[in-house]
Amino acid sequence: MGSNPFYGERALKYDLFFKTAFGRAVKELEGELLVEALKEFKGRELLEVGCGTGVWLEYLKEQGFKEPVGLDISRDMLKVAKAKGLRKLVEGSGAHLPFRKSSFDAVYFMTSLEFMVEKREALLEAARVSRKAVVVGFLNSFSLLNLYRKVKGLFKESVYSAGSFLSREEILKMARWVGEVSRYSLRVESFKTTLNFSVDGFVNPKVERLVGQELPTGGFGIIKFRVIKRDGAGKGD
């Protein structure tokens, strides 16, 4: 998160997306996967890395979770989050988290890792400050939705032009790197997707639920890692 693509009007436009009919449906489907991944941590300490305008901080509170701590590099995004009444907001970089090791029960990303320059380092930092789990929600490069967005981005600049879509394999490669350079291993516990038959502006929640969450082609994917700490292993802390 060394650079900040979300400033000024971009911060406001990001938040407005979730107020559209399409945005509300997307939030509902993605939120179901996030709650499933984090359900064991209700009432526990959570950190969202790249919290933006606090969409998912607010969502988890509505679902009965304790308000997570939200960190973002964009002051403009955090201003929007603060205006919603969210209190646990920190300005900072995902690659250099200002927290002690094992400060949280779980750490999660929701389509924020794509926009970070130092992606591997951000994942390593998440493992360092988490006691139990790291959850990565990402925009899947192997999907109809994000293929459409890629092609559209060739002709018109969008918020996606500032980031890069990710694949499950790329994230697993980053997780292996974390294990190679540190005493933290990230073991895959689950992988699910949604938005399999969606393009920008269209999604059918009934169809998405009917096809299930096991297809690898969903526009949104979520990987849950269990954090394993190896005493004395690796090259760093």
Image (cartoon, helix red, strand yellow):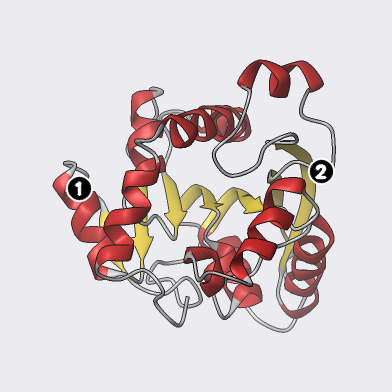
Residue 217 has which mark?
2
**Observer able to see residue 124:** yes
Residue at horizontal 39%, vertical 77%? 4
* Secondary structure category for the residue under label 1: loop
Q: Position of residue 13 (x, y in %)?
A: 32, 55
Residue at horizontal 44%, vertical 60%? 50
Answer above or below: position of 10 versus 28. below
State the residue in front, 215 or 46.
Answer: 215
Residue 87 has which mark?
1
Type of amino acid under label 1: Arg
Answer above or below: position of 69 versus 6. above
State the residue in front, 199 or 36.
Answer: 199
Q: Position of residue 207 (x, y in %)?
A: 72, 19
Residue 14 has which mark?
none
In the picture as drawn, the residue positioned furthest to the front comes out as: 155
Q: Position of residue 42 (x, y in %)?
A: 46, 28
Q: Quadrant of residue 208?
A: top right
Q: Position of residue 94 (x, y in %)?
A: 47, 70
Say which of marks 2 and 1 sits in front: 2
Answer above or below: position of 133 versus 10. above
Give the distance between the C-alpha atoms of the residues marked 2 and 1, in whole angstroms.
36 Å
Type of amino acid under label 2: Thr
Residue at horizontal 76%, vertical 29%? 213
